[in-house]
Image: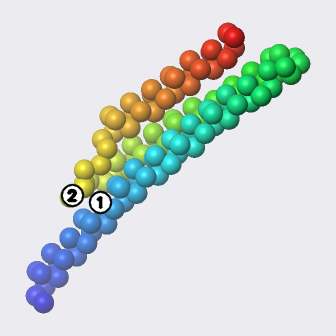
Amino acid sequence: MSESEGQSLAKDRTDWAEDRTLMANERTYAGWMRTGLACVGIGIAFNALFTKMEPQWLPRAMASAFILVGIIIFYTARRKSSAVLERLSAHHASPVNSTNINLIAILLSAASFALMGGIWIM
């Protein structure tokens, strides 16, 4: 194998590794978004299970705390995933772009805030 062939193979392996890292970033982002949604779901469950608890603000506060944790997770996942996308370049893979990552996080955060508002209005 000539030196130029070796360099070409090394570049291919590096490109594939970068693509694998981008795909791993997507899976990690999805995992964190699921974790954030689980926090929101736990918040809803707390509010539903403890509706008769006194004082009445306590189950709402517990639910709000979990929903806020979910929103923080959405924000952190968005920030970390976007940072990886800025550092790496796709070669053969087509990862989700930063705009879509931001949109998903913003929409889930807005929906979670609306849900929290609904819990306090009820």
Up/down of 82 relative to 66, above or below: below
Number of residues whose C-alpha sits closer than 10 Å to that of mark 1, classed few (under 14), some (14–19) or many (20 or more): many
Q: Is residue 105 above or below residue 2?
A: above
Do the CB atoms of the residues marked 1 and 2 lie less than 8 Å apart?
yes
Please name the residue that numbered disc 2 is placed on: 91
The disc labelled 2 sits on which kind of residue? His
Residue at numbered disc 1:
19
Q: Residue furthest right?
A: 54
Q: Point out which mark residue 116 bears.
A: none
* Image location of residue 2, percent across then percent down: 10, 88
Nearer to us in this view, 59 or 74: 59
Q: Name the residue rendered at 51%, 27% in the picture.
A: 109
Q: In the displayed structure, would residue 14 be above or below residue 92?
A: below
Q: Name the quarter where the N terminus is drawn.
A: bottom left
Amino acid type indicated by mark 1: Asp
Please give left or right for residue 55 compared with residue 81 in the image: right
Placement of the C terminus among the 4 image quadrants: top right
Residue count near mark 2 (Cα–Cα under 10 Å), binned few <14, some 14–19, many ≥20:
few
Residue found 38% across the figure and 30% down from its top: 103
Distance, label 1 to label 2, CA atoms, is 6 Å
The quarter of the displayed image where residue 119 is located: top right
Looking at the rendering, which quadrant does residue 93 occupy? Answer: bottom left
Q: Position of residue 106 (x, y in %)?
A: 45, 28
Q: Is residue 101 above or below residue 118?
A: below
